[in-house]
Amino acid sequence: METKEQVTMIVSELTRIPREELNPGTDIFESRLITSLGLLELVSRLEQKFGIIILPEELIHEHFSSIETIIGFIESKLAEAS
């Protein structure tokens, strides 16, 4: 399964919104899909799924504002690790 599908699946599970109904460009905080506590759960799941460590200073809006930005961030973390 590719990164996009995995990230979308995680967000879908956290928000209880079917994957096909999620818009990858929607700001997940402005639309209140995920709260600050939800972000912690999201980070935990991403770390487990992709075998990465997300540092506290990386918890910024530019990395987690939408499914698209999360995918880009995860792909850059995976590229760093390889």
Image (cartoon, rainbow, N blue to C red):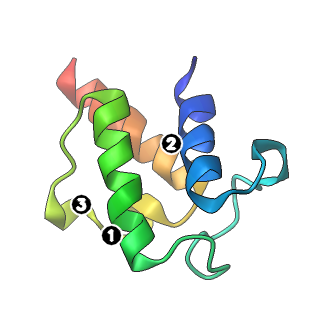
Please rate how many residues cluster around mark 1, counting C-alpha atoms within 10 Å: few if below 14, some from 14 to 19, many from 20.
few
Locate the N terminus and report the quarter of the image it occupies.
top right
**Secondary structure category for the residue under label 1:** loop
Amino acid marked by disc 2: Ile
**Secondary structure category for the residue under label 2:** helix
Residue 68 place in picture, x, y as percent: 59, 50
Q: CA distance from mark 3 to mark 2?
A: 14 Å
Residue extending furthest toward the right: 21
Q: CA distance from mark 3 to mark 1?
A: 6 Å
Q: Are marks 3 and 1 in contact (CB under 8 Å)?
A: yes
Residue 32 place in picture, x, y as percent: 62, 80
Amino acid marked by disc 3: Glu
Residue placed under numbered mark 1 in the picture: 60
Q: Earlier in the sequence, mark 2 or mark 1?
A: 1
Q: 37 left or right of 29? A: left
Q: Which mark is residue 75?
A: none
1 lies above or below 61:
above
Q: 1 left or right of 53? A: right
Q: 43 left or right of 62? A: left
Q: CA distance from mark 2 to mark 1?
A: 14 Å
Which residue is at a point 54% across and 71% down the rendered structure image? 34
Quarter of the figure with residue 14: bottom right
Residue placed under numbered mark 2 in the picture: 71
Q: Are marks 2 and 1 in contact (CB under 8 Å)?
A: no
Please rate how many residues cluster around mark 2, counting C-alpha atoms within 10 Å: few if below 14, some from 14 to 19, many from 20.
many
Residue placed under numbered mark 3 in the picture: 58
Which residue is at a point 63% across and 61% down the rendered structure image? 15
